Amino acid sequence: VNEMNFPELLEFIQSIDLSSLEKHIHGHVPFVIILVKAMEKWLIPDESGCPKHPPKTFAEKQEFKKMIESMSMNYSMELNFQEAVDNASLVYVKREIPPEVEELLTMAEENMKTSSTSFDVLLVALKRFMDENEGSPPLNGGIPDMTASTDYYIKLQNIYKTKAQEDQDKMRKIIQTVTDEYNSETLPVVSDEELSVFCKNVYNLRLTKTRSYESEYDFVYSSDDQKEEIQGELIAETFDPYSSAPAQTPLLWFIALRAAEAFHDEYGHYPGRDSRALALESDANIVQEKMKDIAEKMGLKENDLLASTLFSEEEELDNAFAKEITRYFNAEIHNIASVVGGIASQEAVKLITKQYVPMNGTYVYNGIAGVAGVYQF
């Protein structure tokens, strides 16, 4: 716990003397308090006077946990001390900002020159907040359920809520400074609700930039680098096929479905409209050629997985995907529509509320094997 960043918590912790507590109270001290007191005890210099550091090695961490156990009156009966041992890492491992968030913060100021969304404003404010607070982001303000007396829990909860509100107030002042520096007339207003949600989720921030369906469908890329990156990811996906039956890998069926769409673009109807045997065979042959064209555009023409499945010359698999796509004639099965519709509505809620991370790519569901994949095309 950084005394400069959270003095109120330390003051509360130091007001509690574990050794003087009665047994029933001792067993209901929040594990947060136990951990901080254990660390204070751990950091006491040894007999030589050399200062100690927080546990680093596995042996030191095990020793630290044993010390927490020794601080209890009856470890097997005191759940709060068991919780302290289970959460011991919280007091000696600093929670780092994820690389995805670090990348957003690095580009925050630069993005303000070309865009003016409230998210950009909040990112700039967050970066400046962390620069002013030794790299620490705003406090979330929430605490988990734990073994604790009602009195201790409410006091701890209020301390965290108060600190979180103070951090939000600091963020609000920084936001005002940012809007003054840039053109405040064109910058969007950041609402209190938006600021609150942002501060509570600083470790989970993501910026998802999707490609348009038109770009995916026509295989249009903004640059050679983007094309190389997307095709490289697709190649990597083929190295991890559906283990039980590689032929059921969703990516393969997506290529087959795209071939049916290409057939429709050229002939004005989906393959399989004419149910006579020769017509079905003819449509399947055309779909097979369309699959080869699409695989080539995806950079997968010489791929081993596709060679052993989509384009296999074995009698059992010869044109098997094309024949199945032709046989089903673009049917929409109710149970499959239900699954895909449910997933689509779930993703829509994420986008509307701007909470939780949506899927970044095209979701492909294979109802034959009940497996799915998300791909960027």
Image (cartoon, rainbow, N blue to C red):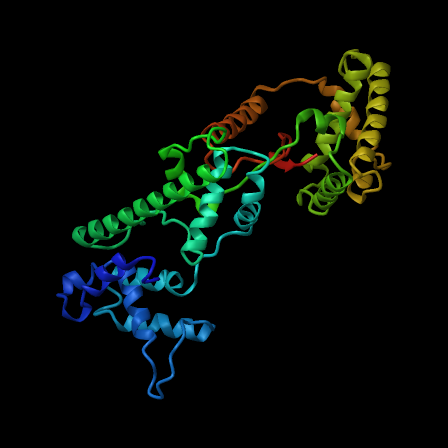
Picture coordinates of residue 244 (x, y %)? 66, 43
The residue sitting at 45% across, 56% down in the picture is 135
Q: Quadrant of residue 321?
A: top right
Is 58 left or right of 50, judged from the image as shown? right
The residue lying toward the viewer, choosing from 375 and 1, is: 1
| Residue 317 visible to the viewer | no
The residue lying toward the viewer, choosing from 232 and 112, is: 112
The residue lying toward the viewer, choosing from 286 and 180, is: 180
Instruction: Tell me the quarter of the image containing the C terminus.
Output: top right
Picture coordinates of residue 346 (x, y %)? 49, 29
The residue sitting at 20% across, 52% down in the picture is 155
Picture coordinates of residue 29 (x, y %)? 22, 60
The residue sitting at 83% across, 27% down in the picture is 288
Q: Quadrant of residue 253?
A: top right
Vertical arrangement, residue 12 with respect to residue 279, above or below: below
Vertical arrangement, residue 127 with respect to residue 209, above or below: below
| Residue 327 visible to the viewer | yes
Instruction: Tell me the quarter of the image containing the N terminus.
Output: bottom left
Is 304 left or right of 22, judged from the image as shown? right
Extreme-bottom residue of the structure: 48
